[in-house]
């Protein structure tokens, strides 16, 4: 059953009960969702003026423009914890806006570092080899973070925190022997990009 975000419009004068101006309602149609919200607070409640928007997020990681603004950060530390290499890439334009394009470019960036010459991305398995056997870094620690686009205000001030999204990382292979690989497996093409669809407020 679809889920609707039912929100009271700011342009309508109304009395908010219990500091609630937004509800998520399961219903077959938007009109049903509004009626359910109205019934929840009584038939004479202002929810008849609400707007119902279907909560649908079907943008997957290899859809064009899906990862614009998303930040990928790869760090490699030696067994003592010292940083050896780090690369970052932000999704942008039409060249680095899908997972496969970003994975391919991350391999390019890794191969441009001092310690790595054999990084590669496999678009079929979504596995990024950050260092191959010949690079001799298999006993190192691999950290991969995928961070959402920062939220900013009109002045350009960043309002959000950097919180890595765990679903982007399926598996990491690291901390073995020196003559082993460092790899990260990203999710399949069907993985839906996390997206905040609405923010409610109280008071």
Image (cartoon, rainbow, N blue to C red):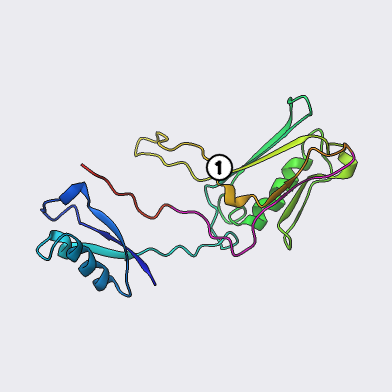
Q: Residue at x 49, y 45 (%)?
A: 149
Instruction: Name the spot of residue 105 as percent of width and height, x first.
Output: 69, 49
Is residue 112 magenta-colored? Answer: no
Q: Is residue 34 left or right of residue 53?
A: left
| Image position, residue 135 (x, y; %) | 87, 39
Which residue in the structure is indicated by mark 1?
A: 164
Residue nearer the viewer, 41 or 10: 41
Query: Quadrant where the N terminus lies?
Result: bottom left
Question: Is 20 rendered above or below residue 79?
Answer: below
Q: Relative to 74, does residue 100 appear above or below in the rendering?
A: below
Q: Spot the residue most to the bottom.
A: 28
Depth check: 156 or 199 in front? 199
Name the residue rendered at 16%, 65% in the picture: 48
Residue visible at 88% across and 36% down?
Answer: 178
Q: Which residues are magenta?
A: 179-195
Horizontal and vertical percent for residue 62? 60, 61
């Amino acid at each position: 059953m679809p889920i609707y975000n039912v929100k009271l419009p700011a342009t309508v004068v109304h009395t908010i009960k219990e500091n609630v101006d937004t509800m998520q309602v399961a219903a077959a149609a938007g009109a049903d969702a509004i009626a359910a919200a109205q019934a929840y607070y009584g038939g004479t409640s202002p929810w008849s003026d609400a707007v119902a928007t279907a909560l649908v997020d079907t943008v997957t990681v290899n859809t064009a423009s899906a990862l614009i603004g998303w930040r990928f950060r790869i760090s490699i530390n030696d067994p003592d914890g010292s940083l050896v290499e780090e690369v970052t890439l932000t999704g942008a334009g039409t060249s680095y806006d899908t997972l496969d394009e970003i994975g391919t470019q991350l391999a390019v960036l890794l191969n441009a570092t001092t310690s790595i010459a054999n990084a590669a991305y496999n678009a079929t398995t979504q596995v990024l080899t950050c260092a191959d056997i010949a690079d001799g870094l298999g006993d190192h620690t691999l950290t991969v973070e995928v961070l959402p686009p920062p939220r900013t205000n009109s002045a350009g001030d960043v309002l959000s925190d950097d919180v890595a999204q765990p679903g982007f990382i399926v598996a990491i292979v690291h901390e073995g022997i020196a003559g082993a690989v460092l790899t990260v497996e990203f999710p399949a093409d069907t993985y839906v990009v996390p997206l905040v669809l609405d923010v409610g407020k109280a008071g």
